[in-house]
Amino acid sequence: MDQAQTFLQQYAQEIELVSLFFITNTLIIALIQLLPVLFVLIIHNKSKESFSEELFISSGLAPPVTILTPVFNEEALVEVSVDALLALKYPDYQVIVINDGSSDQTLHTLISRYELEKVDYAAEWKLEHEPVKDIYISRLNTNLLVIDKENGGKADAINAGINVARSDLFCVMDGDTLLEEESLLKIIKPFVDDPEHTIAVGGTVCVLNGCKVRHGIVEKVGLPKTFLELVQVVEYLRAFMIARNGWSRVGMLTLISGAFGVFKKDIVCNIGGYPKGSMGEDMELVMEMHRYVRDSLSSRHHIAAVPEPVCWTEVPSTIRSFCNQRTRWQQGSLETFFNNISILFNPKYGRVGLLSMLVILVVDVLGPVLELFGYFVITVTYAAGILEFHALLAYIGLMTLFGIFTSLLSLWLEERWNRSYKETRSYIKLLFVAIIENIGYRQLVNLLRLVGWLQFLRRKKEWGYMPRKGVQVIEQ
């Protein structure tokens, strides 16, 4: 102990400089995360312009869309999800469910519920994927197709669905996701406003845990009971209301959630389909689309996020599945960054190369490492008497207030745009969670991101499995 104190006193000035370095870097990360907040508040939201859904449907402007839903061991939610898709308010769409070699009763549930029968279905097999066993069509609703194939992963399943899809636009959804009745109409609007340059659009994903469902529709929006699920509600609102929405408004969006996004089929086919084997195929796909358009077509293209179309998905309810998800997300971000590092600071790729990649570098690649080591260094310097208490308090207070501010703003935007949570007490509860998440939960997430870093360096790929609790279904 005496040797440690002697060392700290001997190198007090150097240690103080290191401490200031980590504090400065953490503040830079916070300032970068503040940018989308400013974009949301300052830049006009075009998606909120006057929009008559009835006129949109009757005018024939709505383009045909194919909804692709890959499922693997989703028997708990697949029936509810498909019911929601078949109840959508949209004039011309087809639903293709891809059973990716499920080992549970997913396929049997689909066959029984929708009276499926095998058909010979013509398709363009442009993209590679694992062998297709059978294709089914529903006798109850001919707009529903089911592809049964060998297991190959989510990206492989989506590629099989793209081959079978006949429309120019396709919508990708997770098998545990429920769309609101008018969500498809709202997410298509950017394609109608600018059909030549819009190549992909993402919607808002909300937490399904705690909600009540009837006939595949979220009839009563509720909040989950556990803190782990509640804090993810706040986290999702912050990610979609602010981050995705803000970066979209300045043409710097690099991620569309695999839970709900619409893409141009020809662009995706030209880049070889969904990237297989990637831990972050959603982010990798968007980056490849950016690169392809800049390399092969024109410099002007648009990848957008629209806050109004909402889908609902189940989030991890156990600490194990949560940890697996967050480490996997971090690995996916790192893979995408290093796979596309050649466009970093490359003016040929516009804002994505000059700015978006820089944001990923600072926030996703270096962020968790710098922030966690910053906590350690600051704690040591304070314990050694090098860092003054008021400086430590100011740092912790500033970071906590920043986290609370962004969370509160996301709640306000959600109430302003979507009003998914009808009860005032729900917002009060989320407000409380937004305050306390900054002490403990934020540090846990950064620790899991550091674990993701280590697994990335070890080239260890584990997708993990999230057990489904299912949702509370209201009977007739």
Image (cartoon, rainbow, N blue to C red):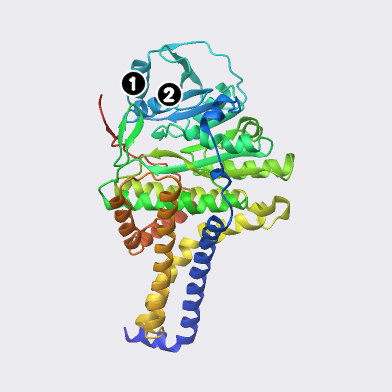
Sequence-first disc among 2 and 1: 2
Q: Secondary structure at mark 2?
A: helix
Total of numbered circles in the picture? 2
Question: Mark 2 = which residue?
Answer: 86
Quadrant, the C terminus: top left
Q: Is residue 301 left or right of residue 77?
A: right
Q: CA distance from mark 2 to mark 1?
A: 16 Å
Q: Is residue 458 visible?
A: no
Which residue is nearer to you in this view: 329 or 167?
167
Q: Is residue 142 visible?
A: yes
Q: Position of residue 42 (x, y in %)?
A: 57, 58
Instruction: Reply above or below: 144 against 204.
Output: above
Which residue is nearer to you in this view: 282 or 52?
52
Q: Amino acid at mark 1?
A: Thr
The disc at residue 190 is: none
The residue lying at 47 percent from left, 35 percent from top is 183
Q: Amino acid at mark 2?
A: Leu
Q: Quadrant of residue 113?
A: top left
The disc at residue 109 is: 1
Q: Position of residue 318 (x, y in %)?
A: 29, 46
Q: Secondary structure at mark 1?
A: helix
The residue lying at 32 percent from left, 23 percent from top is 105
Quadrant, the N terminus: bottom left
Instruction: Reply above or below: 147 against 423.
Output: above
Q: Residues within 10 Å of mark 2 (few under 14, many from 20)?
A: some
Q: Quadrant of residue 346?
A: bottom right
Q: Residues within 10 Å of mark 1 (few under 14, many from 20)?
A: some
